[in-house]
Image (spheres, rainbow, N blue to C red):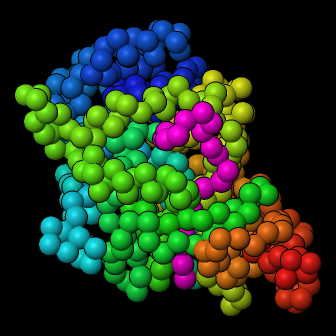
Amino acid sequence: MNVLLVGTGTVGEAIAHLLKGRKWLKKLTLADYSLDRARSVADAVGAGYDVAQVDAGNAQQLKELIAASKADLVMNAVDPRFVPAVFDAALEAGVHYIDMATSLSVPDEKNPYTVPGEMLGDYQQAKSGLWEARGKLALVGMGMDPGLSNIFAAYAKKWTVDEVSSIHIRDGGDLRIEGYPFATVFSLWTVIEECLNPPLVWRNKKIEVREPFSEPEDFVFPEGVGPVMCVNVEHEEVVQLPRSINADLITFKYALGADFIETLRLLHRLGLDGKNPINVKGVKVAPRDVIGALSPDPSTLGKNMVGRAIVGALVSGKKDGRPRETFHYQVCDAAETMGRYKLQPVAWQTGVMPVMAMDLIAEGVWGGAGVKSPDMLDPDPFLDLCEDYDVTVKLEHRLPGRSILPATEQPPVGAQSVTVKGTSTPTDSAYSAAATAALHSPLEDQENIVGRPPRAAR
């Protein structure tokens, strides 16, 4: 399969490295607005990739490049603001398409925090019929989250519960960037967009709007991390998952940290999150681009990152008439990804997912036509492929109702988890004996399930 990679920033660079040596890849072309940047990444990978200069906002340029590169698939790794142009170019060229973030939302002008406006991915979803007519697949939101998080939810629907009542996507851990008062792990432009836009919640068969950073909670993360405060953030899963999974409640919350939240609020109060150019002494410049230019390049921060990034789906429902709650997650350690891949953890964690999706498409395992999110495809082949790509996926049984706690200044401690490696095997034999036994034990004896502190902590 020939691939055109549009964008060689933090995650695009990771994708270029992770594609090296894949047997199913015939040709990779790296395209960027900066030809020097594309050449730098190609030289660093050392795989003989072609390079090209392209304006990601110019659909005609992109279409011409798709033809010139003889691409079978366009991999979009640029900021979400450029999604429409890249998406449309791939459609017109008649090739497959993957992105890691969908087209941007447009909040309701008069009532942004009570009335849904144009939602994430609406621009793309409206053209699904055109993609079907061309017989091509547009896989949208195929990163870590959205992406693998959707696949976790689809797996739960298929195997771990008979009825889904709620899905809570949580992004957190104990990852930190040392040496900087303010820095982001991926594009600051994207961080500002998703964090300051009105977040959404799916509740009782409809979308509801919330205020940024609302409804704080302490979510109990695995791997010994424990409770971490998470808040509402706009994200694709809340829009995508209701199309394929019948659930009463779907939420997305992010562990941002109080200082980070306050900094973003200050940028918003000062108008520095603005994306429309303003006149500054005769020069047109977007305030958000100024902040981005002053911030450290996320691709260079790997050596400053310490800890683990954890993303997962907490799914609650019933299995065989009994309440069941599982947390399916991926954990990524900063030291490990820097040592093994020379990539910062979030770049690796996000970039490896579309590479795996490309693998499945190239081998004919994933297919179909139209605009699809990852939860609309079979989760088993993807999860079975995780081991080949060194992706650590784990599944926990949890005591229902004990993973999400009221936010407190002193969160509870001492939670332990029962963890097994993820698998597509549908039977309970895939789970650890301890987890299975705990599900059928009296509450007083369940001391080792996440969310229930030991007796000494009660």
Residue 234 lies left or right of residue 390; in this view the side is left
Question: How far across and down, in percent of the image, does residue 399 sit?
Answer: 75, 79
Residue 176 colored magenta? yes
Q: Is residue 278 above or below residue 294?
A: below
Q: Give, as a single range, the part of the protein colored magenta.
A: 165-184
How many marks the image carries: the answer is 0
Residue 155 colored magenta? no
Question: How far across and down, in percent of the image, does residue 396 sit?
Answer: 74, 65
Q: Is residue 226 above or below residue 217?
A: above
The C terminus, quarter of image: bottom right
Q: Is residue 42 above or below residue 303?
A: above
Can residue 400 be seen here?
yes
Q: Residue at x 42, y 33 (%)?
A: 295
Question: How far across and down, in percent of the image, does residue 286 sit?
Answer: 20, 38
Q: Residue at x 41, y 38 (%)?
A: 187
In the figure, residue 319 lies in which quadrant? bottom right
The N terminus, quarter of image: top left
Q: Residue at x 24, y 40 (%)?
A: 287
In the figure, residue 129 lies in which quadrant? bottom left
Q: Residue furthest left?
A: 282
Residue 416 lies left or right of residue 371; in this view the side is right
Can residue 122 be seen here?
no
Q: Residue at x 65, y 53 (%)?
A: 173
In the figure, residue 81 lies in which quadrant? top left
Q: Is residue 441 above or below residue 48?
A: below
Q: Which of the two residues, 111 or 11, is positioned nearer the viewer here?
A: 111
Question: How far across and down, in percent of the image, does residue 404 sit?
Answer: 63, 75
